Amino acid sequence: MAYRKNYYLFFFITFSIIAGAILEWQRTITENQLHVTAATLSQSFQPINQIKTEEIVKQKPPEQVVKGIYLTAYSAANGKKIDQIIELINKTELNAIVIDIKDYSGKILYDSQIPLINKLGTKEKRIKKLPELIKKLHDNKIYVIARLTVFQDPELAQKKPEWSLKSKNGGIWHDKNGLSWVDMTNQRVWKYNTDIAKEAIDLGFDEINFDYIRYPSDGLIKNIVYADNRPKYEVMRNFYHYLSRELNDYPAWTSLDLFGLVLEHSDDMGIGQRIVDAVDEVDFISPMMYPSHYYPGHLNFSNPSEHPAEIIENGMKKGSPLFVNHRAKLRPWLQAFDLGAKYDAKKIRAQIDMVEKYSNAGWLLWNAPNKYTDAGLKLEN
């Protein structure tokens, strides 16, 4: 039985890698097609009374049932694209957008003023006028989430090789896709990312979403030289606690992206991710429950992509009890792209319905090239 379980896990991770590579390729193609448009930077001023300048104490936005979609920085910077997305949100049940501020490349995608980022040259200003963009979205009553990848970070690994994962063969280790990672145990890496999160909150984001908060899952894993050989789940648990401590007093919500199978596994699957370690450290946990990422044979389906309702319900039913009487709420990522099956309105809606059967915290739709329609969504009156 243990052999069979490991066999299935091997297939799950393998399919995740292949699917992820396809999605990143789609996104790269889309990004190259988009053109960034300029807009006027809005400035926010502190009110001044007759005696002294008073500091505005910003509060967290009201908690809401988030129903969102993902956008690359290129899409977010494209005025025409943003107007189309706002129109879609205003006519459907959607109410939120997740925007890349640091993606799989490791580049900081806005004009960060963090000294270390400017010293290292790790930013690429794809979103030219970020405060104005956030204001425009808020004016349309849209909840705005910043997506920040953490440990898969080729840019930081190149600029600070002493912070990178090393290879037994010498030099920086690279995964199957040629991407490098930074050391999960290095607290300077932790601070680098929480500083970005704090700046994003100051710029007006309502929530910070952390992705790639795990150990590598593909490539020649056996060649990695880790600086610390503690259990992987212990390292991740300490990192989650660090996020909580650093961001607890900041006026924004926090969320983590985890593998979809965390809802069905109590072990860390070799990548350090367990619900139990994160559920009291952040506000939302977003397992990536894309049916196309589950291995053939999962729930006895030769092609899980063709059975979105069953796949989502199984994960939600098994995972929901893990959130009872804890801080975090369950708000998964759902598939809105064609992989393994045509994801039409029926399949998108089937996923949403199963999430809402077990959770009232909302959901997020992923489509790497950001091609969204109202398919599967409820229309507003």
Image (tube, rainbow, N blue to C red):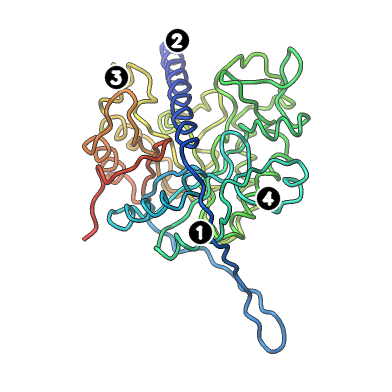
1 vs 3, front mark: 1
Amino acid type of disc 3? Asn
107 relative to 96, above or below: above
The residue depicted at 54 percent of the width and 50 percent of the height is 208
Q: Are dots 1 and 3 in contact, CB under 8 Å? A: no
Disc 2 designates what residue?
3
User: Which of pointers 2 and 1 lies earlier in the amino acid sequence?
Assistant: 2
Which image quadrant: the N terminus?
Answer: top left
Disc 1 designates what residue?
134
Quote the CA–CA distance across marks 2 and 4.
Answer: 43 Å
The percent coordinates of residue 323 (x first, y second) are 43, 44
Amino acid type of disc 2? Tyr
Disc 4 designates what residue?
195
The residue depicted at 25 percent of the width and 27 percent of the height is 307
User: Which of pointers 3 and 4 lies earlier in the amino acid sequence?
Assistant: 4
Foreground of the two, 365 or 312: 365
Quadrant of residue 5 in the image?
top left
Disc 3 designates what residue?
303
106 relative to 146, above or below: above
